Amino acid sequence: MTQKSKISLLNQRRAGILLHISSLPSASYVGDLGSEAYHFVDFLHDIGASVWQTLPINMPHADNSPYQCLSAYAGNPDFISLEILQNKRLLTKTDLAAPITNKLYLIEKAYQAFCKKTNNEKQQQDFADFCTKQAHWLNDFALFLALRSKFNQAGWHSWPEAYKNRDIKTLKKARKELAQQISVIQFAQFVFFTQWLRLKAYAAAKKVYLFGDIPIFVAYDSADVWAQPHLFKLDDNKNMAVVAGVPPDYFSETGQRWGNPHYNWDAMASDGYAWWISRMATQSELFDIVRIDHFRGLEAAWEIPATEHTAINGEWVLAPGDALLAAIKDALPSICLVAEDLGIITDEVNALRNKYQLPGMKILQFAFSGEEDNPYLPHHIEDNSVAYTGTHDNDTTLGWYHAADESQRKHVHDYLQSSHSEQHELNMPKDLIDMALKSNALLAIIPMQDILALDSSHRMNTPGTSTGNWHWRFEWQQLSSAQQESIAVAILASRRS
């Protein structure tokens, strides 16, 4: 995609659907990049939507949160389609016949078949080229993951000192001893990137564009922090003195203590923010549009003493967002960014976003709190915005409406009545979907749960909780022909594509 066409993605009215890869229908334990992903692209094309937004696609920890990952670069191997590996004769029907609860064994088996094939010189070269191109992160990540397995999945900060502190001789020996595991890990990433870029190309042919999401922070137990600890605020023992989060807000009375390390911005500035530029270059290759989660952290971030159990007793510490964004835009002039600007937003944060003309987010579930100057009310939404009924952190719209107090419901009703020339009978979540689509925002995104009119039991995530999240999946049987026709008509009526 050219620089001009990539930037123009957000210069016309578009509609999209929010659905994580894990939420796709699947015969396995999680959605993947196989036939159902292509089916979903076809569905988007058929209803006139041109954007598919996902959550971060990186490799999570055991809690499956896509916002706490083992690498800022590596894709989640759970998303690899075993069906595609079978089609390439790297797996057999027998391999896929039994219930699959862990893909790693089968990915290793596919790697063994890949190495034995004598007629795949091009694929072997493609793999070698991939490893060379991605070596700047892949080498450390593959060793990190192999060592993590060697030490029973313990975090790097509890490894023996020589491994924790990256003693050169120790790591050289480990690379030799763990060579087979390292190769399998590299192969898994090669397969993930290959399958992802193939899906992206198919989507582009259908005029559907992929909208990604990157967490502003990385996990403490990640290859990034282990490999380059100087880029993060760690003490002499590589422990965190402060951790990231947000103060009390709409989502939580005690705030959110995320537990990520903060950046050592001085160290990052010393090499022109090379780590950030490299990270964003990878995301720009995988996605057509990239959302920066917690954008306000680029202006100032909430630092919480590591000894605190909640986020209440933190403080705002300035960050060099202007210099960072300037460096990113200079290195990647065609990158298409969106700012997640929810929460406590100051004039300084707005000024930073506006300086780089980044669209902000407008959530309609936040609009009906009673104040007429509420910036989320549809008539206040400016065109350089992305309008949502709700996000992955919100309840479904049907669940939100059922839980709303009487004043909120009345505000919704009154607002609808004022925008219709005839008496309007409430229809949730369709009414909120229509509001988002009819708004001035150039991009409107609807969570798949709202398309399906699902209740709170289908919520993706509840901020401030650590269990029961990230598991939701849909089935095509849940989508009626009437629902599909309804959203297609609404998109067309809102002059979106």
Image (tube, grey):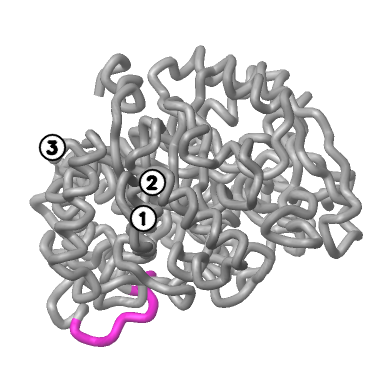
Q: Position of residue 267 (x, y in %)?
A: 75, 26
Q: Is residue 461 above or below residue 255?
A: below
Q: Position of residue 44 (x, y in %)?
A: 20, 50
Q: Amino acid at mark 1?
A: Asp
Q: Secondary structure at mark 3?
A: helix
CA distance separating discs 2 and 3: 29 Å
- Residue sitting at 24 percent across and 74 percent down? 478
Residue at the spot of label 3:
205
Do the CB atoms of the residues marked 2 and 3 lie less than 8 Å apart?
no
Q: Secondary structure at mark 2?
A: helix
Q: Position of residue 207 (x, y in %)?
A: 17, 36
Residue 4, quarter of the rendered image: top left
CA distance separating discs 1 and 3: 32 Å
Residue 180, quarter of the rendered image: bottom left
Q: Specify which label sits upstream in the sequence, 2 or 3.
A: 3
Residue at the spot of label 1:
431
- Residue sitting at 51 percent across and 47 percent down? 363
User: Alpha-carbon neighbours of circle 3 within 10 Å: few (<14), some, or many (≥20)?
Assistant: few
Q: Main secondary structure of the magenta part?
A: loop
| Left or right for 491, reference 268 | left
Decide whether residue 354 is among the magenta residues: no
Query: In this view, which residue lies farthest toward the left?
Result: 119
Tell me, for residue 435, which label it has, or none. Answer: 2
Q: Amino acid at mark 3?
A: Ala
Do the CB atoms of the residues marked 2 and 1 lie less than 8 Å apart?
yes
CA distance separating discs 2 and 1: 6 Å
- Where does the magenta region start and end? 97-105
- Residue sitting at 33 percent across and 55 percent down? 423
- Residue sitting at 40 percent across and 53 percent down? 432
Q: Specify which label sits upstream in the sequence, 1 or 3.
A: 3
Q: Is residue 426 above or below residue 489?
A: below
Q: Amino acid at mark 2?
A: Met
